Amino acid sequence: MPLARDRHKRLYGLHSWSGILFAWFLFVVCWSGTAAVFVEDIVTFEDPTLRHSVPADATPDIDADLRAAHAELSALGRIDYLIVDFPRDRMPFYWIRGGAVVEGEGLREIERKFHPGTGAPLPVRGDGAAHWILEFHTDLMLPNPLGRTLVGLAGIVLGLAAITGLFIHGKLIREFFTLRLMRSQRLKWQDSHKLLGVITLPFSAMIAFTGAYLGIIAILAPIIAVIAFKGDTDALVEAVVGAPLEPVGQQVAMISLSDIQAMRVPGLEDGPYRVIANHYGDAAARFDVLFFETEDLATTQIHPVGGATGAPVDAPRLTDPGPANRIVNALSPLHFGTYGGMALKWIYGVLGLGLCIMTALGTMLWIERRRYGSEGTKSDRFYEALSRMNIGICLGFPAATIGLLGFDALYAGAEAARTVWTGTAYFGLVLLTVLFALLHTDGYAAVRRGLWGLAGLAVISVTANLAVHGWPSGRGDVQSVMACLIGLAALTALSARWLPQGRPTIRKRVRRVATDETGGPSPAF
């Protein structure tokens, strides 16, 4: 028994410290990931020019636009990539984008969008809320691979917290049905934290594993190259994907995009959604044509064809649909929930929100136990400041994301500066919320007022979008975003009504405290 008790206490300590040391960062990553699940819908929500249906038989000629994009990139420097996306329900436009490596400047990118029926150019729009939400989750808006690696580390921390939480709460079935709503506020927090931990455990484990892989893969390649290929990263890439395609220097006409769009693969209902042009215009050009899977979690099939002939060519190793590649290719759609429809996104959204609430509750419990229990080794002033900062962060980033959707609709500046102003608005809302929390002496009142603020922001964002862009008739994706915002407004308003007006009378910190069922000290309040 003493050995088991010691092991339990060590696991409890590991769970507690692994959570609190990275709690704010973990909360930010989880919250941004929850919002990123709906990023394709947010694209249409924020851009009214995309709220149209895709014609069933229209295939406008945009080959001239592709050739113009290729010529523009060639004039800049060495072409790094050239991609064309075909219209589909979620992204109803032709999308040409590419990048060229400019000497002394690095990668410079271009993009063009065209109407699916007429082929007319769509208005150029800067990257707004959707771009910010996705990029902030995947890279924290930091240079690659730094940002993505940090996000991957958040996945490792989440996995560690999930595993240790599973072991310290051995009575999962009993705890699943334990929610003492009529007891003290501390017990409500504690039971809610455990209940959400049980409900979200499989989801948390999956998100942790896939997120860790997608994040740390950026630093694995150099490490493997050093170990296995004596630092030669190019040799590693060739070993994985095969020898790079080399141009022959002979310019020839390419097959048309309409011919590629008409391609069909046995067993797949839809045509291709993307083509990646390698060495466009060269006799050795290869087009990697991508199709959505209909049954498998690995959502993409790649069928390479000759750029000049359209005939199938030998596939690179990564296009081989073997078991290993299918597993690796499944990780990204599994992480972002893109392998299903809107119902799956809502499930991911609810579970992600539960994970965020669980993280926030765990942090609150940690601070309260040290501020009013005997575990604290710092001054009351320190824990008070920590509590206020925790409230500011856990309210600030949701406020920034929700407010960003309204800001995007109201933005009237230059499109080239939209991303800069989007980031300014985002961090401005975070800082304002943190300042709001720091100025409150009563944490209960701060949370209550902050939740009312979140509800108000959600309503304002929906109202602003409707006022500027009008009602999205027939657009289920836009209506889904609006439903999410209204649902968040209702949830936060109900939570605000449920919370006490202010903090109840608290006894002074005691030297000895009881032990709760987790084996950890129970806060005295």
Image (spheres, rainbow, N blue to C red):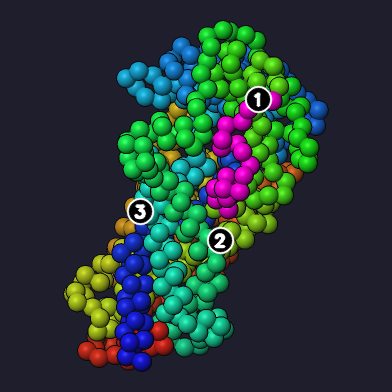
Spatial distance from mark 1 to mark 2, Cα to Cα? 50 Å
Q: Which residues are magenta?
A: 312-334
Q: Is residue 54 left or right of residue 492?
A: right
Q: Name the residue nearer the viewer: 371 or 78.
A: 78
- Residue 488: which disc? 2
Residue shown at 60% from the left, 12% from the top: 283
Going from N to C along the chain, the mark reached first, 2 or 3, is: 3
Residue 150 seen in render: yes
Q: Is residue 326 above or below residue 240?
A: below
Residue shown at 63% from the left, 42% from the top: 321
| Dominant SS type (magenta) | helix
Q: Is residue 164 left or right of residue 85?
A: left
In the rendered image, which quarter is residue 384 located in? Answer: bottom left
Provide the residue designation for mark 1: 313
Provide the residue designation for mark 3: 432
Is 317 one of the magenta-colored residues? yes
Going from N to C along the chain, the mark reached first, 3 or 1, is: 1
Q: Name the residue nearer the viewer: 512 or 478.
A: 512
Q: Position of residue 33 (x, y in %)?
A: 49, 53
Q: Is residue 198 above or below residue 339?
A: below
- Mark 3 Cα-neighbour bin, 10 Å: few <14, some 14–19, many ≥20: some
Is 104 one of the magenta-colored residues? no
* Amino acid type, callout 1: Val
Going from N to C along the chain, the mark reached first, 1 or 2, is: 1
Q: Is residue 486 above or below residue 469?
A: below
Q: Is residue 262 left or right of residue 99?
A: right
Callout 1–callout 2 Cβ contact below 8 Å: no
* Amino acid type, callout 2: Leu
* Amino acid type, callout 3: Leu
Residue 492 seen in render: no
User: What is the secondary structure assignment of the residue under circle 3?
Assistant: helix
